[in-house]
Amino acid sequence: MKKLLLTSEGLSNQNIRNEFLDLLEKPASETRIVIITTGSRTEEELKYVEESKEELIETGIKRENIKTLDLKHKIIYGDVERFDAIYFCGGNTFFILHKVRENGFDKVIERFVNEGKLYIGVSAGSIIMSPSIVTSSDENNIGIKDLTGLKLVDVLIVPHYNEDKKSIIEEYRKKLSYEIVSLTDNQALVVKNGKMEIVE
């Protein structure tokens, strides 16, 4: 059974946090989570990672049960096998998809999810789970041509939705055959028991 929590801004409100806790198969205090970053080590990324850790700790996850891995290095299944959830941070969607493919982490995520463990995506970490990342508003500054995502959901995710993006989304709906799910910063798409639901 796939369990996915795809968000714009992580555990941004109590309803999303409650959904996160419901998706866990054990008490939060016993749950082990690995946070995946782009490995850019910019001040902004480091700050966001710390904020993400604090959000998780506020739900009852113990600090010592949170590990950070970054895409600068190859991540094999053994690195995440003992964890109950992957929390994939945001960044440039094109760069992240490139790095995920380059080091084979796409296969690790697929195995992790197919074993029934929880995947939490934030922004680009949510987009890459779609059949394609074509709806990403990031700059394709590495020039990747193949925009095929990991296909672990069959809808296209558009995070950070607001009224300014409405006309852009409508154009995508006319051109693309996939269903598009747009998420505001206070919404998440929950996938469990073969069903999808938006929480806000």
Image (tube, rainbow, N blue to C red):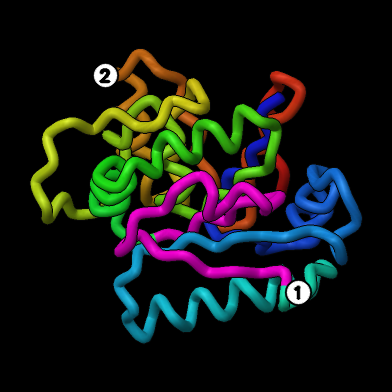
Is residue 182 at least partly visible in the picture? Answer: yes
Q: Position of residue 151 (x, y in %)?
A: 43, 25
Query: Residues under labels 2 and 1: Cα distance?
Result: 42 Å
Horizontal side of residue 187 vs 48, given as left or right: right
Residue 90 found in image quarter: bottom left
Q: Position of residue 66 (x, y in %)?
A: 66, 69
Mark sitting on residue 57: 1
* Badge 1 density bin: few <14, some 14–19, many ≥20, Cα 10 Å: some
In terms of secondary structure, where does tag 1 sit?
A: helix
Q: Is residue 71 magenta?
A: yes
> Which amino acid is tagged 2?
Lys
Residue projecting furthest to the top: 177
Of residues 159 and 97, the one nearer the viewer is: 97
Which quarter of the rendering shows the N terminus?
top right
* Badge 2 density bin: few <14, some 14–19, many ≥20, Cα 10 Å: few
Residue that badge 2 annotates:
175
**Relative height, residue 77 to residue 14 (above, below):** above
| Residue at 46% in and 21% down | 179
Residue projecting furthest to the front: 78
Residue 150 found in image quarter: top left
Q: Is residue 94 magenta?
A: no
Horizontal side of residue 93 vs 186, given as left or right: left
Residue projecting furthest to the bottom: 43
Of residues 159 and 163, the one nearer the viewer is: 159
| Residue at 67% in and 53% down | 83
In terms of secondary structure, where does tag 2 sit?
A: helix
Query: What span is colored magenta in the figure?
Result: 65-90
| Residue at 67% in and 52% down | 82
